[in-house]
Amino acid sequence: MTERHFSVVICVYTEDRWEDILAAVSSVRAQRLPPLETLLVVDHNERLLNRLAREYAEHTASGAVRLLANAGPRGLSAGRNTAIAVARGEFVAFLDDDAVAEPDWLRRFAEGYDDPRVMAVGGRTLPAWASGRRPAWFPEEFDWIVGCTYRGLPPGRVPVRNVLGGNASFRTAAFEAAGGFATGIGRDGDKRPLGCEETELCIRLSKALPDAVLLIDDRAVIHHRVPAARERFGYFRTRAYAEGLSKALVARSVGAGKGLEAERRYTSRVLPAGVARGVRDAVLGRPGGAGRAGAIVTGVTAAAGGYLLGTLRARRGQAAFTVAPIERTWRPEPAGEVGEVGEAGEDMRVTATGPAREGEAHIPATRTAPAGEGEAA
């Protein structure tokens, strides 16, 4: 296997996840295939940025860890775009700030890129329940509710329509061809948990590069923390509704054919089988069977309601998102060769300028002097 150079991106936004952030970074530093760099992008939280600068002062000086302030609007998509613009690796991997990667995570990603047509490789995300075990009523078919791999995805290393953003990697060339993550779809801190930004990107990428291959390798494993609040039925229902809203935006952008291609199989095959299993378990007196069947029906109903409302809003022009073309400030060398990265501790600052029009955003990146003490670029 040719040596691969990865920039790992972790977007953070709150000190409430301080221990989670440290654990995520530690898991990246423990990879058997060491990353070229770890990029920590702070979402409009100066106190957190300064605290991280103190925590990782030694690592930022060596360039192993780089701190960036989100240069775009608040939210996960703009934070990722900030990192993509300055990433030094030929490949960019994304890890959620409340997840830890197994030691072979990057190595499994790297193996997938032996085929030059492969533009993205995702992995398997397992839930780490705060209560210590899955709630009896929570169906595995809906593990996407908590950002994890769900029942119904094919096993092994297989082609897919889209990867899941909290455990995924891309060639940097993919962003140059298709642009960055869309803002206006994805997550924004603790606000309504929208999503689908990676779905929209992957569909857009496949349109820009028709021969592109996107894979999921279930050996690239991370463990994603599920806090107690997300084990509750109220969160389940709200998140399903929000997914429907997001799917409506995606379908409006790329067409219902591609935007709902995987969802049709999921709702026509995977979910009915899940309901049948739940009913069977209830009849056999097994715990949680009726609850799982009911949760699946509720989740489908909530998502459908969100989709209908989102479609209506999109038609009225009340919902829109922007896509950012990525102007990269660093051109990675081909795999197996790495160019000079400048003086130790030197970093990039990305500055968003100019008004964004619907379907377009401009995020130029400019090189600056090394960040001073207590400051992160």
Image (cartoon, grey):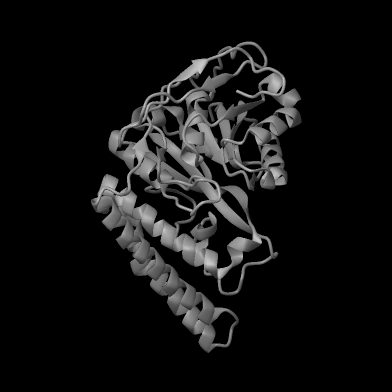
Vertical placement of residue 98 versus 63, above or below: below
Image x and y of residue 150, in percent: 50, 60
Q: Nearer the viewer, residue 267 or 364?
A: 364
Residue 329 visible, this angle: no
Image x and y of residue 246, in percent: 38, 52
Identify the residue at horizontal 65%, vertical 62% (top origin).
228
Q: In the image, is 28 to the left or to the right of 245?
A: right
Identify the residue at horizontal 49%, vertical 47% (top origin).
187
Vertical placement of residue 223 versus 1, above or below: below
Q: Nearer the viewer, residue 3 or 38?
A: 38
For residue 132, which quarter of the picture?
Answer: bottom right
Vertical placement of residue 209 versus 242, above or below: above
Image x and y of residue 290, in percent: 51, 81
> Which of the image's four quarters has the N terminus?
top right
Identify the residue at horizontal 29%, vertical 54% (top origin).
313
Residue 214 visible, this angle: yes
For residue 9, which quarter of the picture?
Answer: top right
Q: In the image, is 98 to the left or to the right of 280?
A: right
For the image shown, how many numbered marks are present on the structure? 0
Image x and y of residue 91, in percent: 50, 30
